């Protein structure tokens, strides 16, 4: 059981980071998708933000991935 706890701690300390860039315009797309972009901190075309790869951020990226370019850092 101790080995599993150490593994979880190692995963949290080695948080992967993602650089997310808005490459397509959200004009004309669903309001929920525009809200996801706002939650990611992307307001303008070609704007970028760096996020930790948490489940919530990955869910947002998955929803609006067709508008984004995602790179691992």
Image: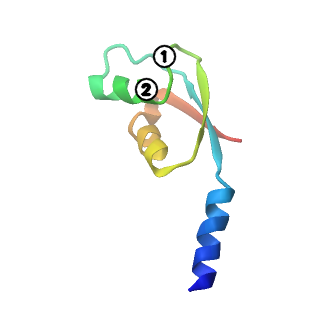
The residue that appears at 43% across and 26% down in the rendered structure is 37
The residue that appears at 36% across and 23% down in the rendered structure is 34
User: Is residue 30 in sight in this rendering?
Assistant: no
User: Is residue 68 in sight in this rendering?
Assistant: yes
Q: Is residue 69 above or below residue 45?
A: below
Rendering quarter of residue 21: top right
Q: Secondary structure at mark 2?
A: helix
Instruction: Spot the residue most to the bottom.
Output: 1
The residue that appears at 58% across and 18% down in the rendered structure is 47
x, y percent for residue 72: 67, 43
Q: Is residue 27 above or below residue 62?
A: above
Which quadrant is home to the C terminus? top right
- Which color scheme did the rendering employ for the protein? rainbow
x, y percent for residue 63: 38, 38
Mark positioned earlier in the residue sequence (2 or 1): 2
Q: Is residue 1 above or below residue 52?
A: below
Spatial CA distance of label 2 from label 1 is 7 Å
Which quadrant is home to the N terminus? bottom right
Q: Which of the labelled discs sits on residue 65, or is there none? A: none
Q: Secondary structure at mark 1?
A: loop
Q: Is residue 52 above or below residue 46?
A: below
The residue carrying pointer 2 sits among few (fewer than 14), some (14 to 19) or many (20 or more) residues within 10 Å by Cα, namely many
x, y percent for residue 6: 64, 74
Mark 2 — residue? 37
x, y percent for residue 67: 46, 27
The residue carrying pointer 1 sits among few (fewer than 14), some (14 to 19) or many (20 or more) residues within 10 Å by Cα, namely some
Mark 1 — residue? 43
The residue that appears at 35% across and 25% down in the rendered structure is 35
Rendering quarter of residue 30: top left
Tell me how many marks there are.
Answer: 2
For the residues bearing labels 2 and 1, Cβ distance under 8 angstroms? yes
| Residue 18 left/right relative to 24 | right
């Amino acid at each position: 059981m101790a080995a599993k706890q150490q593994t979880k701690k190692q995963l949290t300390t080695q948080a992967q980071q993602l650089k997310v860039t808005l490459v397509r315009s959200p004009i004309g797309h669903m309001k929920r998708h525009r809200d996801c972009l706002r939650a990611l901190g992307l307001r303008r075309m070609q704007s970028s933000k760096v996020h930790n790869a948490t489940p919530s951020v990955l869910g947002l990226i998955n929803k609006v991935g067709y508008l984004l370019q995602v790179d691992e850092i």
